[in-house]
Each structure stands twice: as C-alpha cells, then as structure tokens.
Image (tube, rainbow, N blue to C red):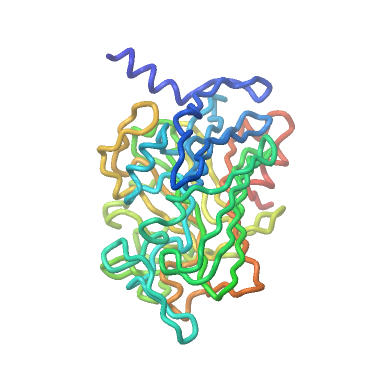
Amino acid sequence: MKKVLFALSALAMVACTSKQQCQLPLADKANFAKEVDGKQVSLFTIKNDAGVTAQITNYGGRIVNLFVPDKNGAFQDVVMGFDNLDQYQSSNDGLYFGALIGRYGNRIGGASFKIGEETFNVDANERRNSLHGGKKGYFAVVWDGKQLNDSTLELSYLSADGEAGFPGNLNVKVVYTITKCNAIKIEYFAETDKPTVCNLTNHSFFNLSGDASTTINDHVLMINADSYTPVDWSLIPTGEIASLDNTPLDFRTPTAIGERIDKAHGYDHNYVLNDSVKCCKSGLTLAATVTSPVSGITMKVLTNEPGLQFYSGNFISGKETGKYGKLYPRRGALCLETQHFPDSPNKENFPSVVLNPGEKYYSVCVYAFCNKECCEKDGNKECCEKENCENK
C-alpha cells in the first residue's frame, strides 16, 4: 500500500530541464470525451518551449492541470482538480475547480439589481444571493474551443439574453496563453446587444507545494492593497471601503497564510488593489505574490482589474478525492480571483460593471511563475523580471 501511495504522489512531480521533453502525467483526453447538452467536451493541452504545460477542458473552461518548475527543476502540478469529466459534473456546487466564472463573478446581493429603472432577478444559488452566475453559470457550460497554436487556446460562448436572468446576448471569448516566461495569461473579451452587467474571472485553486494533500497555511502571501470591502453575515459587501490597518486581513507585508487565518475566521475577502505598482512591460497592476517555502515556486498575479478575491479554501470538505488519488484537505488551496467588486451592481460607489451595446469588455489576469533558477537559466532573467513585474 505504501508503494502505491508513493507512486501516486510522485506522479505530480517530473524532473527535467527546459531543453528536454518532459513526460508529464497528463490527464487522459478520453476521460473528457463526452457530449454535454448536445455539445462535445474536449481536453486541450497548451505549453511553452520550457515545458510549462496546462490542460484545459471546454467544459466550464476549467484549468485541469498546470505544471511549472520548482527550485530543483522538477515540474509540479500546482492546481487542484479532477482527471475526468464525471467528477467535475458531480462537484459543481461550491467547488468551481479551475473554472471560468460568469456572467457575474462573486456575489450579487438578493439575486437582483437594477440597470436604469429596470429590475432584473437572477438565479439565487447561495441562500438569497446569486453566486458566480447562478446555478448553471459559465463553469457548467460547454464552450466552443479552438487551439490557435501550441501555446494558445481560444474559448467562446454565446450567453443568451435571459440566461440565468441576465439581460442581453453576451458574446464572450476567453484566450489562454502559456507565455515564454512561464506564465498563464487569461484574457477575457465580451460584447452585448443590451445593457447588462459583466464580471468575468477564473476560479483556479492553487497549492504551490506540488502536494495538494497538504494545506496552504505555510504559503507566504503578499497582497498589494491598503483596503478591502467588508461584508455582512451573508458575505455581501456593506458598501464601505475600509482600511486593512490592524486587521488580520493585512498582507501588505509578506506573511504566512496560517499565521492569522483563525483570527480572520478563514479568508474570503475582496481586496481593493493599489494601482501604483505597475508591471514595467504590460502596465498591469501587481495584485499579489505567493510563495511555497517547500517547492520554492513563486506566483505573481497581474491584472487590469480593481479587485482581488482571496479565498483560503474554507469550504473544501476534506472528503473530496482529486487527481493522483489525493484527498483534498480543508484549506488545501487558495484562490486569487481578479475581479470587479462583489455586489457592484447594487453599490453606486463601487466601480461600474455595466456593459452597454457598442462597448468592448476586456479583462486580463496573468499568473506568472518564476524562481531564481528559472530567471538565471537560458538568458531568461530579463524576461522573467518583466513578466513578473520586478520594479527597479
């Protein structure tokens, strides 16, 4: 039995250099080859020349695997998920592993909002509130997939007028790219034929140690924010934008997640990002940096969005068996979701999420992975610094 467990844990780690073809433990495409709602589900693989590889299914646009190098050059799978479609379908409620989220990421209080004088009632799927687009948000639909090249995947979806109660036909396109500097870049595009609300994000669960059977309490996190949006008992913002001073939510100084997690009663908070720290190449805001002391993997989050939802896996049950036969523990992963603020349609003082006909929605999130060895290898130092927003 011990030998079997060792073999399973070793599957997530493959040692190789950027000059070698890595034999990664990729998910079997046959496990995703199925029709859902009359559309074909597939599993796509994108990668860069250094071997950084992601597998993404067009069922919910979910990132199934993401392999990046650790401090020793071993490739680690750093996202939670399942190795087959059936588990994703049976685990929709409350997990959202790796999924695209829309039409409205996060919560809408009372599952209703107004645009002008017209009130719209949308799916209530978390008590009286709407969460992540309702009972069948974008996480549970089949997108049209097109692999543009070895490193780029395009997904598209027509979200019909009235779907889940949202107004307007919304044409959505999401482009995933594995960049040459070991990042996964997610770009969101949308257009509508009626005034609507739009707030798209990705719900990947990260454990940078490469061992998702452990917690992320030892991960060291920095969030580039001085304030946050406090919430009521149902996790709906009160409308206040409050200082992080003297709270257990303050991550301006890099801090181990577990150091104050119980004082915060777990993290599921929207941070108001400081837009003063820009990436020197892209102009994006540096939202957060997180490092696993075990693997040495650092992930930096870059975005053009005003907010970041930090979630510490509070509702992972500890009973879910994921990839490689591993049991996922409570607080076994963290989410860093770039976004507009929760309940923005009902908060006039929050940045607007209204999208009008003729306007083009564009959002971008970059999850960039690098470490000292990566940056110094193969002349990548300058590239990694720019991609990871190292200011001089």
Q: Residue at x 41, y 64 (%)?
A: 164
Residue pictured at 53% horizontal, 35% vertical: 43
Q: Is residue 342 visible in the rendered structure shown here?
A: yes
Is the N terminus in the top left, top right, bottom left or bottom right quadrant? top left
| Picture layout, residue 202 above or below residue 14 | below
Q: Could you tell whether 385 is left or right of 340 in the image?
A: right
Q: Please, is residue 324 above or below residue 42 in the view?
A: above
Q: Is residue 253 visible?
A: no
Residue located 30% across and 57% down the image:
264
Q: Position of residue 20 (x, y in %)?
A: 65, 20
Query: From what the image shows, is residue 350 above or below residue 378?
Result: below
Q: Residue furthest bottom?
A: 117
Q: Residue 6: image x %, image y %? A: 36, 17
Of 93 and 262, which appears nearest the observer? 93
306 sits left or right of 130 in the view: right
Q: Position of residue 169 (x, y in %)?
A: 55, 66
Residue at the spot 63% in from the left edge and 32% down from the top edge: 374
Q: Residue furthest front?
A: 38
Q: Position of residue 371 (x, y in %)?
A: 58, 36
